[in-house]
């Protein structure tokens, strides 16, 4: 019989190159004022050819293992929609970069919901008793797929990676993953897509994505709150996918969580897709925003469409600042 999955390590990784709003306003028809007012983003990171998804994922995973004080793991999952190659998956390469040859390793593709998908299914694997420890990594490098003159996507996206190490424990330990919910609806396939045609860029229907993201994330937050029996006012921190500041504050207000409880990290990194939640967690950890045992809800919405949420308590953790 399996056990509760408990977070024991956390790490993040960011490319070196900082791209400010001012820099983007030279390349496309936008302005620092518009981007800050409509999205809350001030800067983001762009990876170069030496900073592929697997490179960033490996750095984040290594930091999560150091943070947990471990040197091995039973299963490694990389949530990414920007793998190094169409095939094979990125996860076996990351495992081998860490010296973990022979372990189970696979990718999950759920775009911006990827980390929540990977964390939930990793928690199910531990609960089932199939494994006792998992490295869950969210890593994406979408900026290489952006149309250089598309101001809708160009101002939002950045690159990065984040990782957690989880292992078997009990519900009352800080870091316990207490409830999960995952959903998809393929009818929204064209809202966020990179068509499989030569030279295709990332395409997004921003306004419709905004509406669906608010309603789907709010519903899944309410689902996990009801599973664990927490009221909205019990929640110490809402760590939602970092796409747009207005989405974060609207989800907080729809669910009745005070907007001061919404963790904000997108101002410094933009939307890093599958990396966004674990990177926001590293921000909360390094800034001392959280205390072990705090009640935390994670939620995300992404291409597919896909969405979900996780209710957990904040772990006892030390984390290095990836900035
Ligand atoms: N800079 C300056 N002006 C811009 C702009 C930019 N980067 N992008 C759009 N505009 C303009 C539009 O052309 C429009 O001008 P008009 O009124 O003269 O026609 C105006 O700003 C408003 O455009 P709109 O599309 O209504 O903007 P918005 O407030 O919906 O913001 C997004 C656009 C993309 C920032 C917003 O829709 C969003 O964040 N969507 C969700 C994205 C997301 O979460 N993606 C990831 C999900 S996983």
Image: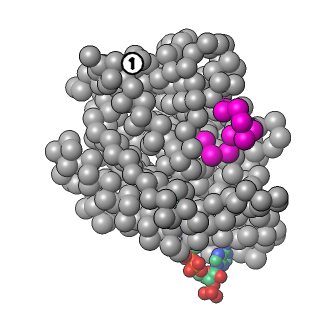
According to the picture, the residue beneath numbered tag 1 turns out to be 130
Q: Position of residue 251 (x, y in %)?
A: 36, 62
Whether residue 65 appears in this view of the structure is no
Q: Position of residue 161 (x, y in %)?
A: 61, 38
Locate the N terminus by quadrant.
top left
User: Is residue 308 left or right of 101 when viewed as pictured?
Assistant: left
- Seen at 31% across and 53% down, the residue is 221
Specify the segment rendered in magenta: 80-90
In-front residue for pair 316/203: 203
Question: Magenta segment, principal secondary structure?
Answer: loop
- Seen at 74% across and 49% down, the residue is 46
Whether residue 191 appears in this view of the structure is yes
| Image-quadrant location for residue 100 | top right
- Seen at 70% across and 20% down, the residue is 97
In-front residue for pair 305/277: 305
In-front residue for pair 201/57: 201
- Is residue 162 placed above or below 171 in the rendered structure? below
SS for callout 1? loop
Residue 82: in magenta span: yes
In-front residue for pair 260/252: 252
Q: Position of residue 253 (x, y in %)?
A: 31, 65
Residue 102: in magenta span: no
Locate the C terminus by quadrant.
top right
Decide: few, some or many residues near mark 1? Use Cα within 10 Å; few <14, some 14-19, many ≥20. Answer: few
- Is residue 181 placed above or below 232 in the rendered structure? above
Number of marks drawn: 1
- Is residue 227 placed above or below 6 in the rendered structure? below
Q: Is mark 1 within 8 Å of ligand 1?
A: no
Q: Position of residue 297 (x, y in %)?
A: 34, 46
Ligand 1's quadrant:
bottom right
- Seen at 39% across and 26% down, the residue is 125
């Amino acid at each position: 019989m399996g056990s509760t999955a408990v977070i024991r390590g956390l790490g993040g990784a960011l490319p070196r190159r900082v791209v400010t709003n001012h820099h983007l306003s030279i390349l496309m028809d936008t302005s620092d004022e518009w981007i800050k007012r409509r999205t809350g983003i001030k800067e983001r990171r762009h990876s170069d050819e030496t900073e592929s998804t697997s490179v960033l994922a490996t750095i984040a995973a290594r930091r999560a293992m150091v943070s947990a004080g471990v040197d091995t793991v039973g299963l490694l999952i990389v949530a990414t929609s920007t793998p190094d190659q169409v095939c094979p998956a990125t996860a076996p390469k990351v495992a081998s970069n860490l010296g973990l040859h022979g372990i189970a390793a696979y990718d999950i593709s759920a775009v911006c919901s990827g980390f929540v998908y990977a964390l939930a299914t990793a928690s199910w694997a531990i609960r089932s008793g199939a494994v006792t420890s998992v490295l869950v990594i969210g890593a994406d490098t979408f900026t290489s797929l952006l149309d250089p003159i598309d101001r809708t996507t160009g101002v939002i996206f950045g690159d990065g990676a984040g990782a957690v190490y989880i292992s078997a424990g009990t519900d009352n330990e800080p870091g316990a993953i207490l409830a999960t919910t995952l959903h998809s609806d393929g009818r929204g396939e064209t809202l966020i897509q990179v068509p499989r045609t030569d030279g295709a860029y990332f395409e997004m229907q921003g306004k419709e994505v905004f509406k669906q993201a608010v309603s789907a994330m709010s519903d899944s937050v309410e689902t996990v709150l009801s599973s664990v029996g927490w009221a909205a006012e019990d929640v110490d921190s809402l760590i939602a996918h970092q796409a747009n500041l207005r989405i974060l504050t609207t989800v907080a207000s729809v669910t009745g969580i005070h907007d001061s409880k919404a963790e904000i990290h997108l101002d410094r990194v933009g939307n890093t897709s599958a990396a966004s939640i674990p990177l926001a967690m590293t921000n909360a950890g390094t800034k001392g925003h959280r205390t072990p045992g705090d009640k935390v809800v994670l939620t995300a919405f992404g291409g597919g469409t896909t969405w979900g949420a996780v209710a957990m308590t904040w772990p006892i953790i030390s984390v290095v600042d990836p900035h």
